[in-house]
Image (tube, coloured by chain):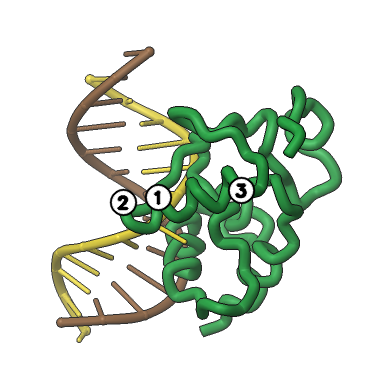
Chain colours: A green, B yellow, C brown
Amino acid sequence: MSWDPVYRLVKKIPRGRVTTYGEVARALRLPGGARAVGYAMAAMPSGRGIPWHRVLGADGRIRLPEPYAAKQRRLLQTEGVALGTTIDMEVYGWSFRKSKTGRTAKRKRAKPH
DNA sequence: CATCTGACGACCG
DNA sequence: GCGGTCGCCAGAT
């Protein structure tokens, strides 16, 4: 399937920064297709250097089943992302576009790794 | 070909 | 503020 654009976009996410499925879907012109993006992640070939763990739900919550969620949390922590009940998108959130509501511009203070 | 499901998101009660 | 429902796209059965 042609999920290449999705993978490429995810790979573009800087270390220590995260994004949402909806954000990716919008960047790929897939309105409402956030689920499709999630499906793409599930079908993602492992070992491709794709930082899939940097993709979260719009609420900054991990939308993965337990086994994967734990792994994702660990990976994010390794990158210096503060993991609470929900990840602070205003701090670690990252947009593919130049600027968006907050994100890169309004970010509070990313915890120094 | 019809229907359900899913690593989502927004709306409504 | 929270929980439930509907809508979105793609794949599987």
> Which residue type does callout 1 highlight?
Ala
> Which residue type does callout 2 highlight?
Glu
Tell me if C10 is positioned left or right of A82 in this view: left
Q: Residue at x 48, y 53 (%)?
A: A72
Tell me the number on the disc at residue A70. Answer: 1
Measured from the top left, where is residue A101 in percent x and y? 73, 31
Chain ID of residue with mark 1: A
Measured from the top left, where is residue A43 in percent x and y? 44, 75
Report, in whole angstroms, how far the alpha carbon at label 1 lies from the one at label 2: 6 Å
Which residue matches tag 2?
A: A66
Chain ID of residue with mark 3: A
Q: Residue at x 44, y 28 (%)?
A: A85
Q: How many marks?
A: 3
Whether residue B4 is situated above or below residue A101 in the rendered picture: below
Whether residue A2 is situated above or below residue A6 in the rendered picture: below
Mark 3 burial class by Cα count in 10 Å: few <14, some 14-19, many 20+: few
Mark 3 vs 1, N-terminal side: 1
Q: Secondary structure at mark 3?
A: helix
Tell me the number on the disc at residue A41. Answer: none
User: Do pointers 3 and 2 mark residues of a single chain?
Assistant: yes
> Which residue type does callout 3 highlight?
Thr
Which residue matches tag 3?
A: A78
Mark 3 vs 2, N-terminal side: 2
Mark 2 burial class by Cα count in 10 Å: few <14, some 14-19, many 20+: few
Report, in whole angstroms, how far the alpha carbon at label 3 lies from the one at label 1: 12 Å
